[in-house]
Image: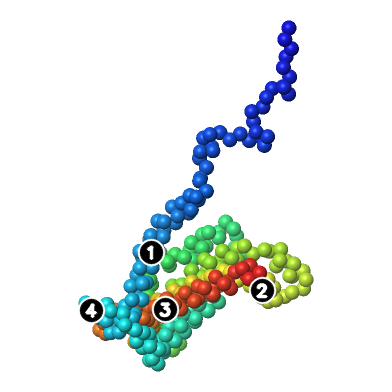
Amino acid sequence: MSTPTSPSSIPNPTPSDGVSESPVLMGSKTRPGLNWLEPVALLLPSGIWLALLLVLPTLVIFELSLVPGIRPGDVVNPSGLDNYALVFQPVYLQVIARSLFFAFGTTIVCLLLGFPVAYWIGQMAPPKWRNLLLLGFVLPLWTSSLLRSYAWITILRPTGVLNTVLTTLGLPALELLNQSSAVFIGMGYSFLPYMVLILYASVEKLDRRLLEASADLGANPIETFWKVTVPQTMPGIAAGSLLVFISTLGDFVDPELLGGASSMTVSRLIYNQFLGATQNWGFGSSLSMVLIFAVSIAIALLIKYGNPTSQK
């Protein structure tokens, strides 16, 4: 009569760690020497796209910027930095300064107008209405920037809608069109939605417990704003300001249509060098490279100082 075998006497083929590795699973592991293939395969399509549409055109522009006085059909023979020396002549420095003035001014205007809107939508508006409010605020972006500029021409011209309303109310008419004020109005209207969207993403994540704690400790609303709200939303403020600054620095439509001849900017000057009467591609390329260099510095500063956690 045979005795039953106890479970403890049955040999267990499972390894001591309790996990069996089948030949299929062992064969599916990536070889150590081929670990780099996965990231390369994922980044290759976007890398090719970036190289063809950004890196190569930038290199071509840089090569043209080293050829003094080159015109369409001339042989490209880089020979020096004469075009860059021409950029720093006083007349062109005034154009660059005017472009920076428009960019900084529009960024400040968008920040001052956009922060209250983003704060109200993100903290005070009912949650069920927030998406609808954001959609209504960005509706102007669904139309062409050219169409928006012509709409402002209709509003701001001497016989336009604004002056018609003012004269009807017995107020003096305003000369806004073909002035710097018209450029600020057009740029601010065009880029304010971008600022609001980025600020809303930061304001929505505000920790309300810190706001309540600040009030409980006796801080007034102004102190709470500067010491609690602004530090928490600083990444959004930096990102939104940089986006608006870069966009307005290279804007062509609003200064061209609303500013008139007295509002020459870098983008309009570059256009004149390539498609205008001057046809100086070398100088236009050097202006483009200066613009790219300035934008790159702004992005580098944002990456280094825009995120408070990266400085710890």
Mark 3 element type: helix
Q: CA–CA distance between discs 1 and 3? A: 20 Å
Kind of residue at disc 1:
Ala
Q: Which residue is mark 4?
A: 74
Q: Residues within 10 Å of mark 3 (few under 14, many from 20)?
A: some
Q: Quadrant of residue 303?
A: bottom right
Q: CA–CA distance between discs 1 and 2? A: 44 Å
Q: Of tags 3 and 4, which is closer to the observer? A: 4
Q: Which residue is mark 3?
A: 291
Q: Which residue is mark 1?
A: 51
Mark 4 element type: loop
- Contact between marks 1 and 2 (CB within 8 A): the answer is no
- Contact between marks 1 and 3 (CB within 8 A): the answer is no
Q: Of tags 2 and 3, which is closer to the observer? A: 3
Q: Residues within 10 Å of mark 2 (few under 14, many from 20)?
A: some
- Of the 4 image quadrants, the one containing the N terminus is top right
Q: Of tags 4 and 2, which is closer to the observer? A: 4
Of labels 4 and 2, earlier in sequence is: 4
- Contact between marks 2 and 3 (CB within 8 A): the answer is no
* Picture residue at 72% right of the left edge, 22% below the top: 9
Where is residue 203 drawn, in percent x and y? 60, 66
Of labels 2 and 3, earlier in sequence is: 2
- Of the 4 image quadrants, the one containing the C terminus is bottom right
Q: Residues within 10 Å of mark 1 (few under 14, many from 20)?
A: few
Q: CA–CA distance between discs 4 and 1? A: 26 Å
Return the mark for residue 225: 2
Q: CA–CA distance between discs 3 and 4? A: 24 Å
- Contact between marks 4 and 1 (CB within 8 A): the answer is no
Kind of residue at disc 3:
Leu
Where is residue 266 drawn, in percent x and y? 38, 82
Q: Residue furthest front?
A: 33
Q: Residue furthest top?
A: 1
